[in-house]
Amino acid sequence: MESKTVRPRSGLKTLMAMWLTVAVIPFFVVAIAGKADAIVGIETESRSHWHVDLNRFALSAHTGFKCEECHGTMIENGRTHPDKANPDFLKKAATRSFDYSRCQKCHKLSYQRYLEGEHAKALSKEIEDAGADGTELKKKTPAPTCGECHSSHYDRSGLSRVDVGKRMIAVCGRCHREQAASYLENIHGKVGVNLENPAAAFCTDCHKAHTVASLKEPAEALPVCRRCHPKAEAEFTNFVIHASLSGLPDTDSPKHRSILWIQRIKLAAIAVVALSLIFFFGHSLLWLLRELHEKLRKH
Amino acid sequence: MAERPYRQNIKIRFSVLHRFLHLVVMIGFTGLAVTGLSLGFSSTAPARAFIWLVGGSANAGWLHRFFAVITYSCVVVHAFWFLYYKMVLSGKLTGPLSIAPSVKDLKDFIQNLGYFLGRREEPPRFDKFTYMEKLDYWALFIGMNTMGITGLVLWFPEFFTRFLPGFFVNIAQVLHFFEAILAVAVKFFIHIGLAHFRPAVYPADTSIFTGRTSQEKIMVDHPGEWSVISESDDSSGERASSVSVRAS
Amino acid sequence: MGIAAAIVFLFFAAAGSLMAGQDAAGETEKPVCLDCHRQPNINTNEGVQSSKAFCNDCHAKPDCRRTVDGKDVPLQVSAETFNDNPHQYVACIHCHTDVARSPHRTAIGGQCRDCHTVHGEGTAHAPHLRIDCQACHFKHKFVRLDETDNRVKLALMNTDQQPIGLVDHGLDDAGNEQSCRRCHQPHNTVGAPVSVLPAKSLLCVVCHPSSLGVGHPIFWVALITFLGGIFLMVRFWFIGSVQGEEKSLHRKISLSSDAVWQTIFSKKVLTVLRVVVLDIILQRRILKNSVQRWSLHSLIFLAILIRFALSLLTGLMFSIDPDGRLALVLIDKNNPVTAFTYDFLGLCIFLGVLWAVIQRLVVKPAHVKTEIEDNITLGILGLLVILGFIAEAARILMTQLPAEVAVYAFVGYPLSEVLAFMPVDWRSAYPYLWYAHAIMGAVFVAYLPFGKLKHIFNVPLTHVLEEVSGIKKEQRI
């Protein structure tokens, strides 16, 4: 039998093979490794800086206001600002020094709605725990006042629904880290934040704006779910969106048990997938090597 | 027929129905993978680019369900074909021409491993479907039904939570995601690799598209099958075996 | 430290006083312009609440009323009407776009189309394009025909000539037949047929944009008959031998499907395409034989083909872009271009059938053999088209379409002028005409695989098979 040189049957088919190697594999590498930052370009600062950037202020919602309209004069009860004799001088957080009831001047409804919600309850609890003499408890996550979430100097107005939603994840997520992370792992977060679908559910669509609700009770959660899932029934509310164990008050609640089951099944699935892939890839590699060996030996 | 050289004696291995179903599943699966991965890995740049291309996540979702319907329709049609095979063609469920697993497959696997590792000179004598092909088929059977059922739960969560606990939807999502990873990894690397990169078929094994293979290939790759069909070739009425055609 | 405590105390004291529920906007504070006049961002949940609060300042109160012509019209929007409504999450000004101004009245009403698309052929079909959303989707059922723009709108008075308060935001999803009866009843003043007619079935897609469902039982019967006929036809084809195989049906099907597969996935597919374009669509072989025969056949065939293409295009455009201009023009029978085109094509079919009848029954050339099936076929087609035109004319009359709109239907409009002389209540007559045309259409589809119209399946197939297998011209059928 004469030996024939092996030539590809046509240029097109070789091209196909090359394309597969060059394009498909790197695509997957890039897709998995190159994670783009989904929350970019949204100003989320609420940190108080001594200096106000007037360029950014000019673009904000409060542009055009005079400082006095919110901050009053620099004199309060006979003392001038800055008051070096004040023992809290340079120590107290700005969000605990400013009188946020002044926001009611223009934001009456929002302020009243805030007072009905969980954040106001947390604040009043913090006051109680702080003691009658005004000593502040050192807390990692202080209870939110207006200033914890909103930057009166820099927040813009008239943003689109998706931009507002993305901002919410960044801001609420500063204290509710686990919830923000688990939300982004959930379909609501993926569709809303990553894929920017305006019909998705962001924080306040479920937890309501300013009257932040906890939604722990199915009776409270069902009307909320029904906003987008009108045919939902009671059991539907037991779908877990914030699937994190920390922050759950009760270590033996149904939600706790559900999350444990989800984690177990996830581990099992990873194990099955890993073992299967090892088997398939290993077997195919051995097969390819053996066939190549046979082919090379024939010439 | 015995005088014609083996390489030119063309046999039909896959009927038109099977070729058509494979084509539709191929397209459907690719569509499902692309749309599904762009949700599963939605924080990556290629995913966001794809969503932009199809005009939003709602459109991608619609496409995903469309491809799911046509792919699962192929499963249903295949099930009807199986009834036809059993009842009209009197096909056998077991034996050398069947795709059902048997003890011989285990023996073949061990022998084949020995062959890969250089302990044996010859590969095992495979029947119509090698153990790898059977594994592929049955893994697909389990996989597509898993994806189908979990997919249905994710498509109609309000309906399914009427009688299932709410966190079953979370579990459906976990299983759907991991089965997808497994399926995509196996199909896009293993299946395509074995159909394109194996020296025996390089650059491509076209038999699933043309339906045709040569007698030589059957004798080499599936000798167990050849010994069965070469007997029935002489008599008429080839039911469940390959069909001979003129090599024109 | 004391001062700090004082400041903190003041802050929380103010908060506390508010928590106690006192109205801080009382006598001690001057109202601030921006408290009300700041534009809320209605993209946010908070903004929606603020916006609604602004309107509810007046409209939530029972004393929000007006007197019109001495009659009392309530304008209170109560919370109950909103409770189960998805619109409770939407700001008032999102829909009522032109009302936050002085004078405080709306010129255009609620803008449903800002968020919702119009219904297509499937849900509520094209005749309903001339109806405002509110006329169906409002709880109260009084409607009127506005003569100025020939649109059906909500009536402002009920049948007792009392003004209606239009503030019930508990909208009707109009899903059941009961709500259709506000217009589709014998004494309606809006030009609606007296009974609720079904949407066009999928079987109608041959000539009309239609819904995706089969619909009324007569269409199911027609579909099953049609499919049965196709099955019998194909079974007949497989009685012969295929590539030498005489006996085994399984093998015949395998061989023929394999031949089809091999043709499609090879260069021969170009031959197939060439035959389809030249011989099937353009009817080259008939033209080679006789110009007269080609013209007669094309009048009928090409007109139906173009109508079918338009139906498919409409369906496609409506799926892709239901609010787009093209989709809306295509489903609007009163649009000048659409009306003209469909009337023109219908006329072509009619003239073709007429010509064929004259050829077969009057001129009777020697080479033409007329069998009973030919007459049945021409009868069905002819009757179908005639009934279609009559139904169209009746529709134009019934809906009181103004002449300057209707004139583009250059067959239907003159016919409607003729029908106008007849002392018929077209609202009552129209359902009969619709069903007559629909039944005729169902018969047409059902009869396709049985009579002479079978040729629409046989002849193209024969052409393609002959070209692909390269049979010499002399041996062709």
Image: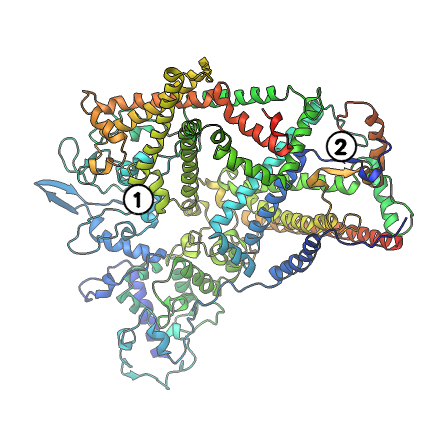
Q: Residues within 10 Å of mark 1 (few under 14, many from 20)?
A: some
Give coordinates of residue C81: x percent, y percent.
Answer: 28, 42
Q: Foreground: C3 or C388?
A: C388
In the image, residue C311 above or below residue A84: above
The C terminus of chain C: image quadrant: top right
Q: Are marks 1 and 2 on the same chain?
A: no
Q: Report which quarter residue C434 is drawn in.
A: top left
Q: Is residue C236 above or below residue A110?
A: above
Residue C129 image point, x, y percent: 30, 38
Please state the total of marks drawn on the protein image. Answer: 2
- The residue singled out by tag 2 in the image is B246
Q: Residue at x 38, y 44 (%)?
A: C322
Relative height, residue A295 to residue C363 (above, below): below
State the residue position of label 1.
C82
Rendered image quadrant of residue C260: top right
Which of the numbered marks, if any, corresponds to residue C305?
Answer: none
Q: CA distance from mark 1 to mark 2?
A: 75 Å
In the rendered image, residue B155, in percent from the top left (x then y), is placed at 52, 42
Disc 1, SS: loop
Considering the image in quadrants, where does the N terminus of chain C appear? bottom left
Specify whether residue B166 is in view: no
Mark 1 vs mark 2: give the one in front.
2
